[in-house]
């Protein structure tokens, strides 16, 4: 029998993710892919997979998987309780499953997104060279449901252990460095407004973007009622819609936008944004 | 890097120059109405190489490339066809002849995967969007708005005036060539028999 896992139950949202499908924005296709890339690549490394292998991104954990073959799994992301059958096992470490074993994730006490890698990777058919589920455009496999059977590839190599591995950090307050531009001139004193603003992560946040509640950024008088022709945007763009409350674009963002982008967060911040729960206080730190 | 330009023709010229340069460090190259976005691999020297291409580009002449020719079958059966004819002061047959007689170019894509903004629309058909956008436009609907015409790849909300429909599947991520239209392609609408 070919190697596979069966989804026994999912948490609030469980998606197949890999490193996404960058390079198709000119066709209107978002990059997609894991939001906390270091967590996914760590999980892959622990089970002997190359970084781009597809795993599962489980929002708030709570997923249960049954192995239909002997395989190695690893759970990364925030600190979380993991069990095989009745027995607690380590997160952030390779765990062996026998045919029939059930892997269960608890709910993380902080952070949002847990990653599960399996030896061989999840081998659903790729779409545009990626297996990632894009919730904006509907490209890729559907969100996981109970009783889904996930085919696995042939194992790549030996699982790699490590003595000390750090869970993804979910800081109490997010301080996000922002490179100003390309449309900072649309705002009054953009650096000062960004530095002075206080926000919290909104409930409306998802893989498209982290929406912020709080201060509204004011446009410069010359741009007050100007409409911006849609233009290309990158992951990490801080877009300011009509409400003035910023949206930080994540992997499933639309490839073009008709509101000005005041700045772009540094690439190192993206994994932190992936783990920021609604209600988390946010400050934006302008860089010149 | 976001390059701001003065016209769609300049966007086309710069996009063409960057395509011809084919820099391996470029991850995304996204033309839009008045801009070209160039995203490069972090830590590479792609930005300075792209900047050199931008500075050397002749914005008054797009580079010679052989565009793809795409033909989209169309039935002129859209719910706004009569409104468009009335606004243009033409008969429905004249609108059909104008729209199907023109050759269009994909200026850029966006809004949804496979949605191409086509330019080359005859002057009388350049009309405002609907005052009240539809909450649901069926997939394959062909519409006009301002200087653009285009076809909806999937069912979605939309405010374009709908003049017809195409049976072409504009986007299918499972196909080896998922998007029927890419920036720079030449497009004609052919009345389905």
Image: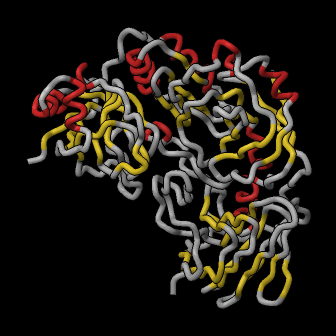
The residue at the point 69 percent across, 80 percent down is: A64
Report whether A16 appears left or right of A275.
left
Residue B184 visible in the picture: no
Q: Quadrant of residue B117?
A: top left
What x and y, as percent, mark residue A85?
77, 89
Task: Indicate whether A195 appears above or below B176.
Answer: above
The residue at the point 70 percent across, 66 percent down is: A58
Report whether A236 appears left or right of B95.
right
What x and y, as percent, mark residue B40?
60, 32
The quarter of the picture where the C terminus of chain A appears is top right
Q: Quadrant of residue A212?
A: top right
Residue located farthest toward the left when viewing the structure as drawn: B193
Q: Quadrant of residue B108?
A: top left
The residue at the point 55 percent across, 55 percent down is: A134
Task: Indicate whether A85 appears above or below B66.
Answer: below
Q: Judge by depth and name the residue closer to the eye, A15 or A117.
A: A15
- Total label count? 0
What x and y, as percent, mark residue B4?
54, 17
Q: Judge by depth and name the residue closer to the eye, A142 or A120.
A: A142
Residue A95 visible in the picture: yes
What x and y, as percent, mark residue A97?
72, 83
Q: Judge by depth and name the residue closer to the eye, A43 or B112.
A: B112
Report whether B79 appears left or right of A142.
left
The residue at the point 51 percent across, 87 percent down is: A1
């Amino acid at each position: 029998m070919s190697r596979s896992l069966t989804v026994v139950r999912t948490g609030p949202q469980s998606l197949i993710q890999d490193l996404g499908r960058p390079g198709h924005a000119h066709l209107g296709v978002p990059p997609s892919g894991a939001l906390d890339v270091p967590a996914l690549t760590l999980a892959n490394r622990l089970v002997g997979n190359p970084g781009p292998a597809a795993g599962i991104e489980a929002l708030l954990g709570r997923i249960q998987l049954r192995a239909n073959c002997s395989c190695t799994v690893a759970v990364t992301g925030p600190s979380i309780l993991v069990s095989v059958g009745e027995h607690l096992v380590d997160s952030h470490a390779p765990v062996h499953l026998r045919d029939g074993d059930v892997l269960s994730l608890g709910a993380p006490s902080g952070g949002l997104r847990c990653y599960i890698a399996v030896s061989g990777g999840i081998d659903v058919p790729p779409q545009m060279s990626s297996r990632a589920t894009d919730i904006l455009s509907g490209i890729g496999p559907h969100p996981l449901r109970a009783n889904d059977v996930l085919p696995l590839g042939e194992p790549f190599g030996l699982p790699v252990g490590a003595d000390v591995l750090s869970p993804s950090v979910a800081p109490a307050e997010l301080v996000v460095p922002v490179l100003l531009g390309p449309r900072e001139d649309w705002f009054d004193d953009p650096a000062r407004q960004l530095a002075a603003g206080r926000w919290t992560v909104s409930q409306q946040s998802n893989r498209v973007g982290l929406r912020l509640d709080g201060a509204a950024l004011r446009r410069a008088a010359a741009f007050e009622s100007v409409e911006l022709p849609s233009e290309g945007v990158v992951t990490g763009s801080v877009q300011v819609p009509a409400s003035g409350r910023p949206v930080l674009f994540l992997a499933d963002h639309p490839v073009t936008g008709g509101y000005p982008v005041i700045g772009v967060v540094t690439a190192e911040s993206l994994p932190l944004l992936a783990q920021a729960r609604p209600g988390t206080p946010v400050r934006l730190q302008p860089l010149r | 890097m976001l390059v701001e330009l003065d016209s769609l023709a300049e966007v086309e010229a710069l996009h063409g120059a960057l395509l011809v340069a084919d820099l391996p460090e470029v991850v995304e190259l996204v033309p839009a109405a008045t801009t070209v976005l160039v995203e490069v691999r972090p830590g590479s020297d792609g930005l300075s190489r792209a900047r050199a291409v931008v500075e050397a580009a002749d914005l008054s002449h797009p580079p010679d490339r052989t565009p793809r020719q795409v033909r989209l079958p169309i039935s002129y059966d859209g719910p706004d066809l009569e409104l468009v004819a009335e606004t243009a002061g033409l008969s429905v047959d004249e609108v059909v002849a104008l729209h199907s007689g023109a050759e269009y170019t994909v200026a850029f894509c966006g809004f949804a995967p496979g949605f191409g903004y086509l330019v080359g629309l005859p002057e009388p058909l350049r009309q405002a969007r609907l005052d009240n956008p539809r909450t649901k436009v069926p997939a394959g609907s062909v519409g006009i708005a301002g200087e653009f015409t285009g076809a909806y790849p999937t069912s979605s909300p939309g405010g374009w005036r709908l003049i017809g429909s195409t049976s072409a599947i504009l986007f299918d991520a499972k196909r080896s060539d998922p998007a029927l239209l890419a920036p720079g392609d030449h497009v004609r609408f052919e009345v389905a028999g």
